[in-house]
Amino acid sequence: MIESGSVKVKEIKMKPAISSAAPLILASTSRYRAELLGRLAVPFEVIPPALDETPLPAETPAGLAQRLAASKAQAVARQKPGRWVLGSDQVPSLEGKVLGQPGNREAALAQLLACSGKSVMFYTAVALVAGDWCFDHLDTTIVRFRVLTHAEAGRYLDAEPAYDCAGSFKVEGLGISLFEAIETRDPTSLVGLPLIAVRRLLFEAGYFVP
């Protein structure tokens, strides 16, 4: 509150502005998210967050994605006061169990065969943070895998070793051949960043795309 004579006037906080001089910050180590964000033609730079991504006890996959997206943005926002920071996280879940990045062929093959003929939920969360301002969104995508043989899964990994992708596939590449169907509101969400939602969050922050 600011006192003006005997009258107390509530201080109005102005939102920071995104510009070429003060670009949006993407709090991420993912090159896929950086490539996607580039499609919106918003000026941005990348600062990787230092964050422990270990799930909390009894934390749901959706809750984990939301917490990590916000924590990534907040961690970098503390380093860059007065700047808008975008954090995002994606957590796939098979029958309630979180699927991580396989890291190697053996784990990727096991992951694909476990998903064979089943539906996997992908929770993709985004948070746009600046000071006390925070706008967020959670996107849910359902991926329905077709029945895969051991040979098919192996041939896929020979052609496209998606060892750095949770779920062990790249939907933007040959991975699309592994599915019966994808149910989503945003086709970019499964790649790692729901651009339809990000556009809306940027609008709420005062930045217009296009």
Image (spheres, rainbow, N blue to C red):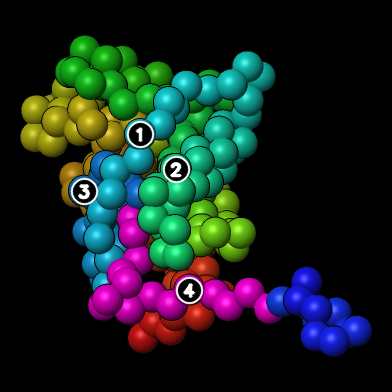
Q: Are marks 4 and 3 in contact (CB under 8 Å)?
A: no
Mark 2 vs mark 1, CA separation in Å: 7 Å
Q: Amino acid under label 4?
A: Pro
Q: Amino acid under label 1?
A: Ala
Which mark is first along the chain, 3 or 1? 3
What residue does disc 3 label?
31
Residue located at (26% from left, 54% from top): 46
Is residue 34 shown in magenta?
no
Q: Residues within 10 Å of mark 3 (few under 14, many from 20)?
A: few
Mark 4 vs mark 3, CA separation in Å: 26 Å
Quick check: can you spot residue 190? no
Residue located at (78% from left, 71% from top): 1
**Where is residue 45 shown, x and y percent of the image?**
25, 60
Which mark is first along the chain, 4 or 1? 4
In which quadrant of the rendered view does residue 156 lie?
Answer: top left
Mark 4 vs mark 3: in front: 4
Is residue 21 shown in magenta?
yes
Mark 4 vs mark 2, CA separation in Å: 18 Å
Label annotation for residue 75: 2
Q: Amino acid under label 2?
A: Ala
Q: Are marks 3 and 2 in contact (CB under 8 Å)?
A: no
In which quadrant of the rendered view does residue 29 lie?
Answer: top left
Q: Main secondary structure of the magenta part?
A: loop
Left/right of residue 99 with respect to residue 13 in the rendered view:
left
What residue does disc 4 label?
16
Is disc 4 placed on a helix, strand or loop? loop
Q: Are marks 2 and 1 in contact (CB under 8 Å)?
A: yes
Which mark is first along the chain, 2 or 3? 3
Q: Amino acid under label 3?
A: Arg
